Structure formats: structure tokens, C-alpha cells
Image (cartoon, helix red, strand yellow):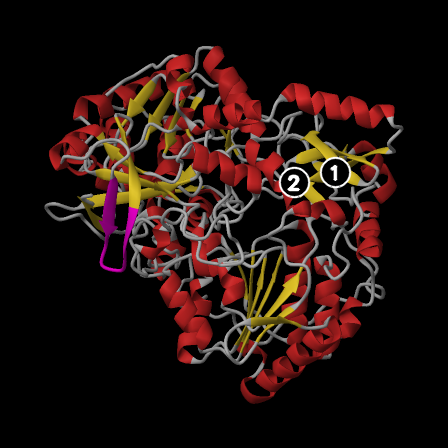
């Protein structure tokens, strides 16, 4: 199916329009009057550069404060991610500083399960004693931390855990993009790549939506490509909000993207449309791949992915005609970041098609760029932490998981079987958003110690013994954030307003306090300012320079178009991987089915982001929650034909049920969804009574998904679920 909706038609009724409309109700005239009045009274105006915390992009922003109170935030023009614009969630996230849902003091779980205030000294002392007890009884490998990487957090959390002697450091990746990046790494040696939008003639998106998971620069780049005449193909069960830029929508059966990609590969190989020079000079494993791919005909693919064979052929031939100025975009979480039993293999298949097109490193193609990092710092002032002797839990079972992220589901299983007895969470809401919440709560209840560091009382905090309050990003200095690409940069999160709640602390102080209480304070005998200055000096700049400029461009990395040297064991693109074979999987890129197939009367359930929210973090923020409520953004999407068959009309309440859970929610009936598929936005269904706006609003998709771990990588397989739906009468 092809479509080319006008921008006006497409935006009508979408979340983007909802956000704009909501801003309009705030009265721009009234806001300008307040601003003029403040200026007239001689208010002290201060501007400062920082980084957003609304999602993992960490876009650059400029904040303005009047008399010490935050007034406005705007995108930093010089930052390569923001380019002068902040998205809706970025503006909303600035409200955390003044949110009534903030944690303002340390909390401890009482005997009756409620939470009571506790002093910092007592909290740190008690946590330290329990950590030392766990180490004495079970060793440091019985401790673990899960963190959502932020500039200071990713440094201090690993340093803290390693100082204790534990290797068990994990990120949120197993519930986000672990499969995708692990698969890309096995094929190319890099964890990700980008599309050269200024020069591209054709790009194919597999499930990813720049219009929903917004990074302003990505939207601008895609808009520029579309305006320049590039063909933009969206392969997705849902016509997502990137459709405003699309020339084609290809609705596909969920979890079957790999068949679509292998069908394209079949056309390119069997019709001799692939780049012989690239394959012969820069790849290994092609003969084995070519022999296998002959089985994956477009007709075979159609039977699995429900995309017509003629469409697969036409897209393959169009890509070949555009090559090398074309690419399959790398996607993120939604389609195969961590979604299905075949997500790792789908990522490899994306890379394989790009290899056949010869587009790696080419103008308009798929680019692998480099990233900068801090150089060496004074080893006396910042002593190196000894490498833990033990191996990280989960690495042996899931050897294809990225070394920098690990499989955080190992913590859940470790708590259940006693291998993990103490767990720390930093900026992570694993209980609500990672995998089956009931299983997380049950597992954490078995641990001897659970500590959460956060700005609000999340569902994970509710499952903890101690909750330590962090101040918001606009109130703290963090370590430098290094930014890669064709050019290299460094930026800095700097305090723009004074700390509002005196009992909150930045993460560097929290981890230093924990380390001291646990007996490893000697590895934290420095301030974040001292470390930031040392790291910046190692790349030729300083806190003062970065603070003044907002962002500093580093030495030219020397990017040039051309076939890259792949950082794989073979130093070539890998159609086949020895490491994949060692993990017990097919070394040659090929077909793997999804795990759960809906039976008669069942639907596939898919999820994804909305442009104003970031996972479960932002729903309690007043303005963003108000937008969701006003425009009923929590609703379950259902295809119009399915709704007609079930006697359901727009706005009806339905009961959604799976093997794990049932719940009721209103329905959005739409033509923008493939029949047989339901879409549930993944921000809703909060259960924390401390987050009053989020509690009980909508459904949490993770409640419905059985707990699975993808072979080889250990991702959550977050969309391997079949559900039933029925209209709730009355």
C-alpha cells in the first residue's frame, strides 16, 4: 500500500497538533505580558547552557532564569542534536525542577511497607552496613546496579560498583536497543550508524519514527531530504508520525521485518543487482549468505510479512537504482531494538541489505562515524579502580550482548535465585518499563537491599528499601558529554538555578557518600568539578570555555566518504560471524521467526513513543500529562476494519487481555493501523501513588507481555505477545 498524505491532513489530530494546541491554550499574549512585567521590574536575568534530560539524546539547551527562577528553555543553535530547537518533552522535562511530584528528602521503607523520611547520614550508614554484610556473606558479585546512562551517572555508577569489587553494571539497553546494536556490531564492528540525509536518494525506515521519538536534528535532516526529493519509505504496522515526510507506507505484520529484508536481499542477489566490488573486496561470508538467501524469495517473504511480493521487488529495484545514495535506516527501540525473538538477526539483515547496496560510507548512504572521549587524567588524583575478578552475571548465557550494557534481566533472575542480593538503580524505572512488572516486584522482594536514586517516587522506588533524591539537571554540574559524528564536540550540563530542595543531591555526591559508607571512599576523593576540568583539559578545553560557549568543537576527526575499515574480527563486513556461531546460532545472516503468533481471534500488540513523552519518566509532569488527557493520548489504537467487525466505535471502552494481565482502556479507531494489530503507547498505566497524575491513567504495555529473553543477547522481547480485546458494555 502506498500513500502520500499532505502535511495538513496528516497532522490533523496527531500528538504534534495536540502539543501545539495545548501551548495555544496557555495564552501567548499573557505569557508575553508577564515577561514584559518581569523585565520592567528589573528582575535579574541569568542565562546558562545545559543539556536536556527528557530522553537519552541529551540535546543542548539554553535556560533563562529571572531572579533565580527558571523562566524559559530553548534549543542550543550550535548543538548538533538540537540545532536551535527543543521538542515538547524537552520543554516539559524542565518542569521537574518545580514539580510537586519530586522527591525532596531520603526515604526508607518502614516495617508496614510505607515510606518514612530518613536523614542522609542514617540512610548512607544503613546502606553501607548492608552492603558490607552482603559482601561478607556472598562476595561483591552479589551486588548489581542498573542505570540509564547520563554523563555523570554512567561514570559514577560503574566506578562505585567496580570499587566494591562487582562487575555487575547494566544499563536500560536490554529493554531498549540492545538487540539492534548487538546485531549491527556483529555485522559491522560499530554499534550504530547514520544515514547521510543531505545526499540520499532513498531511505527505508523499519519501524522507527523520527516524528515520535524526536531528536530535532533528525527531524530537520529528514525534512530536508524529503523536500529535496528523496524517496522515504516507512515499513511499519502503523502509519506513524514520520508519515508527514513519507512517499510510501508499507504496512507489515509485526515481527516479520526480517522476512521483508531478506526478500529484498533475494532480489538484489538473484537478479545481480548487488555491488560486486564491495562484496568481493570488503566482505566475508557472502557465498554462504548468497546460497542461503536464494530460499528467501519475495513470494516466500509475502507469506510471512504480508507485504505483496511485487512491492518487495519494486522497493529492492528502486534501492538498487538509487545505490549507493540510499540506505535502510538503523531504527531504534520500536521495531527491533529489543522487541522479538529475531530482533538481533533483523539488525544483521538491515546491515546485509546495506552491504549489498554498497552504501557503507558513501554519500547518501549508511555512515559509520567516530566518537571522542576523554584522555588520560592524573592517576594519583583519580586512581584507577581495580578490575573486578568475577565475571558479570548474564554474560556467559548471553555472549552477544554488548559489553558496555549487559543483560539487565540477569539482575531479575539473580534476585530470584539468590545470586544477586543487593541492587542499586540510578535514573532507572525497571519495574514499570523494562519487562513484566509483577516479576520485577517479586524478584526485588527477595533481595536483601534495594536502593533507588531518582528525582521522583517511581514504581522501582516503591519496590526499594531506600530512595535517595537527586536534584534535577538544571540544578547540577555533570561530567562532560562527548558527541561523535562527522565532527566531534563536547558539551556540559551546568547548573542554571539554585538547588530548590536542600535535601536533594547530585549523583556525584550521592555515589561519593555511598562509597564512603561502604568503605571505598578512597576512589572518590575528588569533586565533580575537578574531574570535569581534568577530562576537558585532556581534550584541550575547560569548564569555563564550555560553559561560556555552550558546546565546543574538538579536533577534526578526519571523516571522509568511502568504504570504511570495519572494526570486526575480520576487518570486513560480516555476512557470517564466528562469534554468532559460538553462541549457538546460525553464523550466516538468515531467517528467524517471531516467538508468539496470534491465534484466531487474537491480535498482535505493538507499542511505541509519543512525541511529548519519554517512556515512563514524563507522564507525571503537569503540562505533558495535561496534553495527554486533553487529547486522550492514552487510547489503544485499533484498525477501522477490526473495530467494525467487533462492533466498536471510536471512544468505546474495551478490555484488553493477555496471558499475564487484563485491563480497560478507551479505543482510538483509525485507518493508520494494519488490521490484526493493536497499538498501545508505552508511557501509561502508572501505579505509584506518589505520582498522582500518572497513577491509573491508561494501561502499561509491559503488564501484558510475558517475560522472555532473546537468545544470544538477553533482550526483553517486549512485543512478543498476543492479546484479545472485547467491548465493555455500558
Residue at far bottom of view: 137
Left or right, 708 with reference to 419: left
For image coordinates 61% across by 82% down, the residue present is 130
Residue 239 sits inside the magenta stretch: no
Compare residues 294 and 122 and report the one nearer the observer.
122
* Labelled pair 1, 2 in contact (Cβ < 8 Å): yes
Q: Which secondary structure lies at badge 2?
A: helix
User: Label 1, label 2: how many angstroms apart (C-alpha)?
Assistant: 9 Å
Residue 655 sits inside the magenta stretch: yes
Residue to which mark 1 is pinned: 70
Q: Which mark is residue 94?
A: 2
**Residue 198 at x, y percent in the picture:** 54, 18
Compare residues 405 and 44 and report the one nearer the observer.
44
**Residue 492 at x, y percent in the picture:** 75, 42
For image coordinates 50% across by 37% down, the residue present is 626
Query: Is residue 235 positioned above or below 576 on the image?
Result: above
Whether residue 281 appears in this view of the structure is yes
**Crowdedness near tag 1: few (<14), some (14–19) or many (≥20) residues, C-alpha within 10 Å:** many
Q: Which mark is residue 234?
A: none
The boundaries of the magenta stretch are 653-664
Q: Which secondary structure lies at badge 1?
A: strand
Residue at far front of view: 730
**Residue 64 at x, y percent in the picture:** 77, 33
Amino acid at each position: 500500500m502506498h500513500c502520500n498524505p499532505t502535511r495538513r491532513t496528516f497532522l490533523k489530530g496527531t500528538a504534534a497538533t495536540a502539543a501545539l494546541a495545548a501551548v495555544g491554550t496557555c495564552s501567548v499574549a499573557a505569557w508575553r505580558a508577564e515577561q514584559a512585567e518581569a523585565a520592567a521590574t528589573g528582575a535579574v536575568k541569568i542565562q546558562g547552557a545545559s543539556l536536556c534530560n527528557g530522553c537519552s539524546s541529551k540535546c543542548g539547551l539554553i535556560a533563562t532564569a529571572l531572579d533565580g527562577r527558571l523562566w524559559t528553555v530553548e534549543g542550543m543553535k550550535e548543538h548538533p542534536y538540537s540545532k536551535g530547537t527543543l521538542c515538547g518533552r524537552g520543554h516539559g522535562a524542565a518542569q521537574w525542577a518545580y514539580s510537586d511530584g519530586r522527591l525532596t528528602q531520603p526515604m526508607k521503607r518502614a516495617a508496614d511497607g510505607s515510606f518514612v523520611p530518613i536523614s542522609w547520614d542514617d540512610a548512607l550508614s544503613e546502606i553501607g552496613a548492608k552492603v558490607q554484610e552482603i559482601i561478607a556473606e556472598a562476595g561483591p558479585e552479589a551486588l548489581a546496579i542498573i542505570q540509564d546512562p547520563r554523563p555523570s551517572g554512567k561514570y559514577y555508577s560503574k566506578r562505585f560498583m567496580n570499587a566494591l569489587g562487582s562487575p555487575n553494571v547494566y544499563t536500560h539497553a536490554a529493554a531498549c536497543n540492545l538487540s539492534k546494536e548487538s546485531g549491527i556490531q556483529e555485522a559491522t564492528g560499530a554499534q550504530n550508524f547514520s544515514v547521510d540525509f543531505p545526499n540520499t536518494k532513498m531511505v527505508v525506515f523499519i519501524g522507527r519514527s523520527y516524528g515520535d521519538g524526536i531528536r530535532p536534528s533528525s527531524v530537520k535532516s529528514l525534512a530536508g531530504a524529503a523536500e529535496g526529493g528523496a524517496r522515504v519509505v516507512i515499513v511499519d504496522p502503523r502509519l506513524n508520525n514520520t508519515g508527514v515526510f513519507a512517499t510510501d507506507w508499507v504496512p507489515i505484520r509485526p515481527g516479520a521485518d526480517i522476512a521483508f529484508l531478506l526478500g529484498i536481499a533475494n532480489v538484489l542477489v538473484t537478479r545481480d543487482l548487488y555491488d560486486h566490488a564491495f562484496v568481493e573486496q570488503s566482505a566475508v561470508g557472502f557465498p554462504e549468505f548468497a546460497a542461503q538467501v536464494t530460499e528467501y524469495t519475495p513470494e516466500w517473504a509475502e507469506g510471512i510479512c504480508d507485504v505483496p511480493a511485487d512491492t518487495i521487488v519494486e522497493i529492492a529495484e528502486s534501492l538498487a537504482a538509487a545505490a549507493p545514495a540510499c540506505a535502510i535506516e538503523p531504527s531504534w527501540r520500536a521495531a527491533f531494538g529489543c522487541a522479538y525473538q529475531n530482533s538481533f538477526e533483523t539488525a544483521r539483515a538491515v546491515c546485509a541489505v546495506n552491504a549489498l547496496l554498497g552504501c557503507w560510507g558513501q554519500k547518501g548512504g549508511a555512515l559509520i562515524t567516530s566518537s571522542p572521549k576523554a584522555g588520560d587524567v592524573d592517576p594519583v588524583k583519580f586512581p584507577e579502580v581495580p578490575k573486578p575478578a568475577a565475571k558479570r552475571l548474564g554474560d556467559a548465557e548471553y555472549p552477544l550482548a554488548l559489553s558496555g550494557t549487559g543483560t539487565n534481566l540477569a539482575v531479575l533472575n539473580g534476585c530470584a535465585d539468590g545470586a544477586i542480593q543487593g541492587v542499586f538503580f540510578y535514573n532507572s524505572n525497571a519495574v514499570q518499563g523494562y519487562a513484566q512488572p509483577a516479576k520485577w516486584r517479586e524478584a526485588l522482594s527477595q533481595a536483601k537491599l534495594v536502593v533507588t536514586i531518582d528525582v521522583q517516587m517511581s514504581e522501582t522506588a516503591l519496590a526499594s528499601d531506600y530512595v535517595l533524591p537527586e536534584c534535577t539537571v538544571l540544578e547540577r554540574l555533570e561530567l562532560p558529554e562527548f558527541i561523535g559524528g562527522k565532527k566531534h564536540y563536547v558539551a556540559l550540563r551546568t547548573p542554571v538555578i539554585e538547588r530548590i530542595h536542600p535535601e536533594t543531591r547530585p549523583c556525584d555526591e550521592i555515589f561519593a557518600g555511598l562509597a564512603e559508607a561502604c568503605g571505598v571512599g578512597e576512589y572518590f576523593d575528588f569533586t565533580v568539578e575537578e574531574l570535569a576540568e581534568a577530562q576537558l583539559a585532556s581534550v584541550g578545553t575547560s569548564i569555563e570555555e564550555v560553559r561560556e560557549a555552550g558546546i565546543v568543537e574538538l579536533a577534526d576527526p578526519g571523516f571522509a566518504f568511502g568504504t570504511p575499515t570495519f572494526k570486526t574480527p575480520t576487518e570486513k563486513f560480516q555476512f557470517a560471524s564466528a562469534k554468532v556461531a559460538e553462541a549457538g546460532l546460525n553464523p550466516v545472516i538468515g531467517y528467524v521467526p517471531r516467538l508468539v503468533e496470534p491465534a484466531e481471534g487474537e491480535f498482535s500488540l505493538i507499542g511505541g513513543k509519543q512525541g511529548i513523552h519519554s517512556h515512563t519518566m514524563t507522564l507525571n509532569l503537569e503540562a505533558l500529562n495535561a496534553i495527554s488527557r486533553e487529547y486522550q493520548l492514552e487510547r489503544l489504537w485499533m484498525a477501522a476494519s477490526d473495530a467494525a467487525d467487533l462492533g466498536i466505535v471510536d471512544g468505546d471502552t474495551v478490555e484488553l487481555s493477555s496471558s499475564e494481565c487484563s485491563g480497560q482502556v478507551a479505543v482510538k479507531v483509525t485507518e493508520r493501523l494494519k488490521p490484526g494489530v493493536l497499538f498501545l503507547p508505552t508511557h501509561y498505566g502508572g501505579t505509584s501513588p506518589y505520582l498522582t497524575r500518572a497513577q491509573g491513567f491508561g494501561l502499561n504495555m509491559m503488564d501484558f507481555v510475558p517475560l522472555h529473553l532473546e537468545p544470544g543477547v538477553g533482550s526483553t522481547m517486549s512485543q512478543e505477545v498476543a492479546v484479545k480485546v472485547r467491548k465493555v458494555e455500558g
